[in-house]
Amino acid sequence: MSIQPEDRTTIDMFSSPRRGRPKSNPYDRRVQSRFNKRFQRQRDKERGLQRLEVKVEADVIDYLDLACDDLGLSRADIINLALKHWLHL
């Protein structure tokens, strides 16, 4: 019988008892990160969002960050608004 890192039912079956404060999460950081990314993608999909990766020049990012500070919005919000304005949506 082998153990899988994502196995939630037999997590303590193969581990030795440890002293000290118990872990709040039985999984290592790599597995936790994978779970979190998966759940984030599911939340985004439910909200109707899709991922887009773009490379832009550094000075554009500097101006974008200034606009973020002035408007109190995130980069994604400002880019979304700019694209909607440019596409006349």
Image: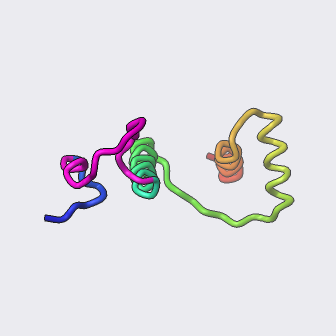
Asked whether 82 falls inside the magenta stretch, the response is no
**65 horizontally vs 16: left or right:** right
Determine the residue positioned at 70% across, 46% down: 75
Q: Give whichever of 22, 48 is nearer the camera.
A: 22
Residue 53: image location, x then y, percent: 60, 63
Give the extent of the magenta segment.
9-28
Q: Quadrant of the N terminus?
A: bottom left
Image quadrant assignment for residue 17: top left
Q: Is residue 20 above or below residue 85?
A: above
- Direction left: furthest residue: 1
Residue 24 visible in image: no
Q: Give whichever of 32, 62 is nearer the camera.
A: 32
Residue 46: image location, x then y, percent: 39, 43
Magenta stretch mostly in which secondary structure? Answer: loop
Image quadrant assignment for residue 57: bottom right
**76 horizontally vs 67: left or right:** left
Determine the residue positioned at 18% across, 65% down: 2
Determine the residue positioned at 46% across, 53% down: 29
**Count the marks: how many?**
0
Q: Give whichever of 67, 89 is nearer the camera.
A: 67
Residue 59 visible in image: yes
Asked whether 16 falls inside the magenta stretch, the response is yes
Q: Give whichever of 89, 79 is nearer the camera.
A: 79
Residue 80: image location, x then y, percent: 64, 47
Residue 13: image location, x then y, percent: 19, 50
